[in-house]
């Protein structure tokens, strides 16, 4: 027997084979720096060596190594293990001392059943599962591929555990668990996504890392069920049971007091909210300047003018003092009030909604909350999007939950929802033929996309918990790093979902490679899909991130880490050069210093450690 992987686990497997009287022919490892292990020479070429056991405890790495081998695989079962004659054990699996495997258990390939673990009758384990020491898995339990069940954990009978889960030591699992989560406790509860569901994550066989993205979509596994229902019933139009059910799920998620319309995008939601507020040609709408363009572009669709208001430094969102100044000056200048106010939950951080609402109420101006990035964020325990007259949500592919593309509008009541739906479905009058007395839009969400949304709602809380966990880990690892500041909730009243974790680099902080920043024109887009982009005309614009920020982005990119600058404020965009703007320099300063870091469900703790190490390594001391 040949053993692949010079590690502590290899020593255990060697002892099992020795106890069975089976000789270990040689140790094999793909690390060229490891030439000796346990007093024996290590081989670096596995070609032609059979049978083999990959003796690596980490499930992902074990799978990557197996996929790179073409040999036959053996098994290693300790003589003291009790294995039923009716149990089936896959190739490459290791069963350690004192383990008990009862009747009709099926164990997949390349699994590890560790010391003293017990697996009761009729259980089924997928490939690459690791059952840690002293675990007790009750009868008729199904455990998906790659899952790790921690030391001393107990799993109740008849449960289904997902693939690539990590269950913490001492957990008591009493209910089914979805794919790709970290869970622990008594009773066991999902804490966050583990970032390891996909075997494409983490280390490759050669020790190289796969790219770490800002926020990849993570599926619960239930999306296909709802999509299949849509196909099976031929509900493949922009209406149907999935749309209705998804809207119901969103209504409950946002508190149950308001109505929700599922739409084709968050941009569509902004557009329809503005329309419902009576915005038209010649009107003005106050919009937070520090935002993505979808907050302001729909204002122009209606022939109105965005008036931009800068941010305050605590939340990075609309400055209430500047907001009131803008209202007063616009009334004095134009003789009429702005038609709406659009604050934005930048990167998930709640705005100072109590102050903004007080000003809006004082001047009787409706508020449209742009919570596209703030799905599940709260202020004083209340979900964003429910304070103003309307609330905007986004389900783009990189948001907290996704419908591939989509959004929703939170409405004050059923009558308003009905009117929004009228305009979202081409504004057709009730005649036996197509009669149109208003301009409408094709903005409804499809029943297929809503099916994805229904599946996503089953893991929405898990996604939010994971993003918060990642931010906390960044905080711990960046503590004491001079010149790097992580943006956090300014007080307990604020509860950000931390859609993207963001940092500021002090202008005095020097980064390796600063002298090469902006030397090369960017081809395409940085940070997410952007469709078709025009080729950059120049290497520089009149306002851009500092050279140390660009140097850090470039360094992280070279290390396989996606990052991107903060949004460039709208009042600094050429397309809005002539628009009124009330500024204090805050958003411009943040844009020049800020960087977004990977935060999504597939970002593991290991990834965060790697990202922070790369940040530290590229700081010039």
Image: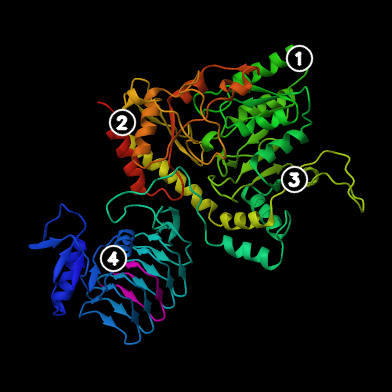
Q: Is residue 615 visible?
A: yes
In-front residue for pair 70/498: 70
Q: Are marks 2 and 1 in contact (CB under 8 Å)?
A: no
Question: Mark 4 = which residue?
Answer: 69
User: How far is the residue under mark 1 from the one under mark 3?
Assistant: 34 Å
Q: Residues within 10 Å of mark 1 (few under 14, many from 20)?
A: few
In-front residue for pair 274/73: 73
Q: Earlier in the sequence, mark 2 or mark 3?
A: 3
Q: Quadrant of the C terminus?
A: top left
User: How far is the residue under mark 3 from the one under mark 4?
Assistant: 52 Å
Residue 481 is labelled as 2
Give SS at disc 1. helix
Question: Mark 3 = which residue?
Answer: 442
User: How far is the residue under mark 2 from the one under mark 3?
Assistant: 50 Å
Q: Earlier in the sequence, mark 4 or mark 1?
A: 4
* Image coords of residue 322 (percent x, y): 61, 18
Residue 288 is labelled as none
Q: Which region is colored magenta?
A: 116-135
Q: Is residue 134 positioned above or below 549 on the image?
A: below
Question: Mark 1 = which residue?
Answer: 334
* Image coords of residue 186 (percent x, y): 41, 61
* Image coords of residue 278 (percent x, y): 79, 31
Q: Is residue 600 positioned above or below 331 on the image?
A: below
Q: Earlier in the sequence, mark 2 or mark 4?
A: 4
Q: Residue at x 51, y 50 (%)?
A: 217
User: How far is the residue under mark 2 from the one under mark 1?
Assistant: 49 Å
Q: Is residue 131 positioned above or below 347 on the image?
A: below
Q: Earlier in the sequence, mark 3 or mark 4?
A: 4
Please identify, in this view, whether the residue under mark 4 or under mark 1 is nearer the observer. Answer: 4
Query: Which secondary structure dominates the residues rendered in magenta?
Result: loop
């Amino acid at each position: 027997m040949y053993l692949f992987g010079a590690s502590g686990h290899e020593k255990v497997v060697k002892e099992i084979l020795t106890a069975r009287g089976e000789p270990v022919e040689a140790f094999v490892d793909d690390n060229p720096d490891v030439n000796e292990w346990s007093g024996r020479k290590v081989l670096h070429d596995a070609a032609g060596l059979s049978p083999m056991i990959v003796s690596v405890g980490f499930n992902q790495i074990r799978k990557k190594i197996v996929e790179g081998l073409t040999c036959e695989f053996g098994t290693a079962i300790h003589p003291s293990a009790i294995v039923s004659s009716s149990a089936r054990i896959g190739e490459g699996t290791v069963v350690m001392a004192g383990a008990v495997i009862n009747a009709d258990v099926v164990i997949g390939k390349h699994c590890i059943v560790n010391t003293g673990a017990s697996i009761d009758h009729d259980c089924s384990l997928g490939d690459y599962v690791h059952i840690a020491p002293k675990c007790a898995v009750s009868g008729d339990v199904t455990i998906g591929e790659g899952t790790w069940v921690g030391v001393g954990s107990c799993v109740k009978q008849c449960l289904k555990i997902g693939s690539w889960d990590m269950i913490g030591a001492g957990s008591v699992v009493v209910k089914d668990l979805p794919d790709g989560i970290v869970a622990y406790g008594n009773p066991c509860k999902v804490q966050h996504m583990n970032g390891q569901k996909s075997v494409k994550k983490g280390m490759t066989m050669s020790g190289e890392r796969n790219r770490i993205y800002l926020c990849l979509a993570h599926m619960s596994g239930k999306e296909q069920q709802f999509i299949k229902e849509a196909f099976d019933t031929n509900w493949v139009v922009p209406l149907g049971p999935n749309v209705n059910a998804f809207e119901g799920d969103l209504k409950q998620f946002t508190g149950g007091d308001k109505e929700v319309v599922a739409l084709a995008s968050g941009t569509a939601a902004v557009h329809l909210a503005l329309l419902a507020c009576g915005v038209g040609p010649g009107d003005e709408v106050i919009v937070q300047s520090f935002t993505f363009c979808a907050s302001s572009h729909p204002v122009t669709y209606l022939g109105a003018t965005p008036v931009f208001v800068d941010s305050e430094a605590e939340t990075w969102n609309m400055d209430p003092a500047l907001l009131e100044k803008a209202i007063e000056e616009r009334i004095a200048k134009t003789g009429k009030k702005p038609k709406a106010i659009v604050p934005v939950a930048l990167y998930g951080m709640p705005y100072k909604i109590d102050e903004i609402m007080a000003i809006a109420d004082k001047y009787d101006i409706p508020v449209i909350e742009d919570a596209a990035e703030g799905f599940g964020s709260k202020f004083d325990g209340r979900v964003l999007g429910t304070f103003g007259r309307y609330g905007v949500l986004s389900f783009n592919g990189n948001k907290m939950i996704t419908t591939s593309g989509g959004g929703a509008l939170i409405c004050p009541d059923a009558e308003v929802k009905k009117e929004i739906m009228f305009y979202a479905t081409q504004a057709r009058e009730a005649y036996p033929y197509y009669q149109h007395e208003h301009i409408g839009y094709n903005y409804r969400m499809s029943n297929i996309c809503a099916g994805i949304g229904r599946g996503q709602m089953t893991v929405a809380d898990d996604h939010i918990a994971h993003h918060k966990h990642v931010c906390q880990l960044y905080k711990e690892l960046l503590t004491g790093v001079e010149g790097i500041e992580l943006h956090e909730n300014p007080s307990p009243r604020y509860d950000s979902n931390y859609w993207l974790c963001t940092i500021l680099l002090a202008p005095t902080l020097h980064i390796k490679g600063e002298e090469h920043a902006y030397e090369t024109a960017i081809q395409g887009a940085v940070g997410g899909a952007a469709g078709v982009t025009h080729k950059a005309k120049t290497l520089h614009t009149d306002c851009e991130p500092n050279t140390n920020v660009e140097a850090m982005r470039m360094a992280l990119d070279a290390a396989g880490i996606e990052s991107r600058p903060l949004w460039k404020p709208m009042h600094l965009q050429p397309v809005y050069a002539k628009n009124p703007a009330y500024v204090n320099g805050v958003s411009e300063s943040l844009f020049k210093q800020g960087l977004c870091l990977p935060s999504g469900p597939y970002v593991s703790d290991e990834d965060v450690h790697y990202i922070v190490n790369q940040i530290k390594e590229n700081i010039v001391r």
